[in-house]
Every structure is written in C-alpha cells, then in structure tokens.
Amino acid sequence: MRCATRLVPMIPLVLLLASAPAPAQSAGEAAAAPADAWPQFRGTPSLNGVSEADLPAELTLQWTYQADDIIDSSAAIADGTVYVGSYSGNLIALDLETGEERWKYSTGDMGIGESSPAVAGGLVFIGDLGGVFHAVDAATGEARWTFETLGEIKSSPVVVGDRVLIGSYDGFLYALDVADGTLVWKYETLNYVHATPAVWDGVAYFGGCDEVFHGVRVSDGAEMVSLPAGAYTISSPAIDDGQVFFGTYDNEVIGIDLATQSLIWRYEHPRRHFPYYSSALATRGTIVVGGRDKMIHAIDQATGEARWTFTTRARVDSSPAASGDRVYAGSSDGRLYVLDLESGEKLWEFDAAAPLVASPAIAEGRLVIGSEDGVLYCFG
C-alpha cells in the first residue's frame, strides 16, 4: 500500500504539541486485554498489544480453519468465539475451543482487507474494501446496520462507550452511534486514514497518509492535536502510561509524551533504513515493532535506545503481541515467532508456509492468527 503525494513539510513535533491538552489515563482504559478476551485490534482501545492471558511455554497447534481467501484481518476473541474477516468478503465466527464454524456473514462483492473486527454490546463491527462499515449480531451473524463511507476501509473499529470510531480512505475519521449507525461526527484529514485510532483520556490519536499525527476528542470530534510527523503513517499508535509510539514510512519509530506534550525520542536503525508498517507493542518498558527491513526491533521505552533486534527472512508487517515475558510476532516469511522479551532470543517458531500479515490475538490460553493462504491457526 502506498499513500498519495506528500502534503506537509516536516516540523519539530515539540513545537506543535505545546498547545495540546495534557491527557492522563482514564478509569476503564485497560493497560492490557483481559485474560478471557481480545475484543478488538491490538486488544484494547490503547492498542498496546498486551494480553493478561497465560500461554503455554511451548505452543501446540489446536486447530486450523480454511477460509476461502486471504486473511489479512487480525482476529478478535470474545465469549469463546473467534471473529475474523477474509478477502472473500466474509466475516466468520468460529468456536475458540474447536474451530467449528458458528456463522458466516457476507459483506457482498467487496472483500475484507486489514480491517479487523471489534466486539462490543453483542455486536461485531468491521469495514470492507468497498467502503462500507458493518455492524453484525455477534450471536446470529445477522446484519444490524451498515454505514457507507466514500473510500475503502482498512482501519479497524474502536468502540468507546456508545460510539464506534472508524477511519476511511475518503480521508475522514468517523464516529457512529453503536446502536443504529447514525453519524455522530466526522473529522477530515488531508489524505487516507489507514491507521486505527488509539484512545486515551477521551481523545483518539492516529497518524495519517497526510503526514500529520492527529488527536480528536471522542465526545464531539474537536481537534485537540495536529502535528506534522514528517512522513506517511500507516501503522497504528500504541499508548502506554500516557506515552504514544508509532512507526513511520520515513524509517523511524517516534515516542511522544502526552502529559508533557514533548517528543521523547526518535529511533532509527543505524544501518537498515526501511519503513514501518507494523504497529508497536508497548509492554514492561519496551517498545517492540516489526520493520520492512525483515527485523523485529525492541526499543527502550525511556531512552529510545535499541535493546535488541531479531532478523526474520522477510518483512514484518504483522504487529507483535505480548503475554508475560514473551513476544509473539508473524512475518511475511510465513513463520510465527515466539521471542524472549528481555533478550530477543528465539524460543519457538511455527512455519505456516504462507505470509503472516495479520497480527496475533491472545485470549483464554490460546493464540489465533491468519495467513495469506486463507488458513486460520489456533495454538494453545
């Protein structure tokens, strides 16, 4: 995926952040997904990619499900059910324990790309490549409502209270009423909105193909932060303890402190200069992110210094997830890797024989990930 022509010159981040409010963590904004659910992309609205679930020290394959097309959508897990989309345009619900299909919902002629399901209030939300956003009954797979945007949807939905947020390639971030899909507000950017917004203290933060990092108040759509990031931002931000981290197409990972409104650091590998498409994992003082340089990078959250790198055989667009002191990441080399968070040592790998662009979902002692040959894998 490529963004359109650059629109905004680079300006130091700190200059534009000075006028932004100083957020703090709100009650209910979980630092990690609960052990029994992974209800949205990256686990929680802060998108930090961490689960409280315990996974076995050595994973074993529990089941597979063959979808009828590519799976780039990352799974959601809620109430013992796995939800995932495929390029065939199907949103699929499977039993987490057995892999048995519970229902299949068709979006029509348009496929589901990287947009990943979010589950809340008995509904499953997902966008398709035709620009339609769908709300589906989680129990039955019946359509509840749809909302049409004017561009393809690769962003994943985030539910905040009684509204659901979604970005579109028409350049808008939308807030819709969860119950009926009524438009509450829309916020205009200057280019595609590919990233999923991360929510912190009532503000939705996301980067865009307009090279701007945005902060939008969830209650009314008011702009709270707008700062040039100097490059396209495809990856979704991760927020941990009031700090936000995201990679750019200018080969950097950026950290910003939202309380002091200042740039913490910029990280760039000293020799390998490739874009970041993967969204960051933020856990235990470490930022972990995949790169198109075929590497998984671990960065000290406080200093921005490299802790370790791990080299795969192809680019890493899949976003790492964590359980305890282990990192789980897919690669386009077709392998799922388990790495030690402290050292980056490889502890285990599984060869799926097809690129893993989707990101791991972790809940109830299981890990679920889809591949580009349409196979959904469940490990436990």
Image (cartoon, grey):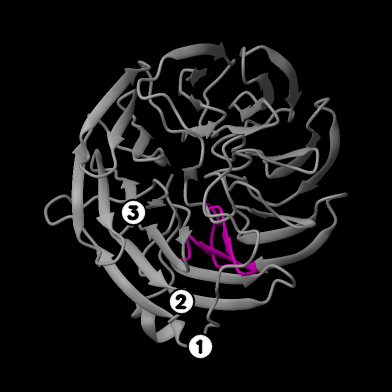
How dense is the environment of label 2, judged by Cα within 10 Å: few (below 14), some, or many (20 and up)?
many
How dense is the environment of label 1, judged by Cα within 10 Å: few (below 14), some, or many (20 and up)?
few
Residue drawn at x 47%, y 78% is 259
Task: Look at mark 3 in the image and give the residue it sits on.
Answer: 287
Separation of disc 1 and disc 2 at Cα?
10 Å
Residue drawn at x 58%, y 54% is 30
Q: Does the image show residue 173?
A: yes
Q: Does the image show residue 251?
A: no
Mark whose residue sits in front, 3 or 1: 3
Residue 199, by quadrant, is bottom right
In the image, is 156 to the left or to the right of 318? right
Which mark is first along the chain, 2 or 1?
A: 1
Marks 3/1 in contact by CB < 8 Å: the verdict is no
Residue drawn at x 42%, y 49% is 279
Task: Look at mark 2 in the image and give the residue it sits on.
Answer: 227
Residue 85 located within the stretch drawn in magenta: no
Numbered range of the magenta stretch: 188-210
In the image, is 276 to the left or to the right of 358? left
Which mark is first along the chain, 3 or 2?
A: 2
Which numbered disc covers residue 19? 1
Which mark is first along the chain, 1 or 3?
A: 1
Separation of disc 3 and disc 1 at Cα?
26 Å
Q: The residue tagged with tag 2: helix, strand or loop?
A: strand
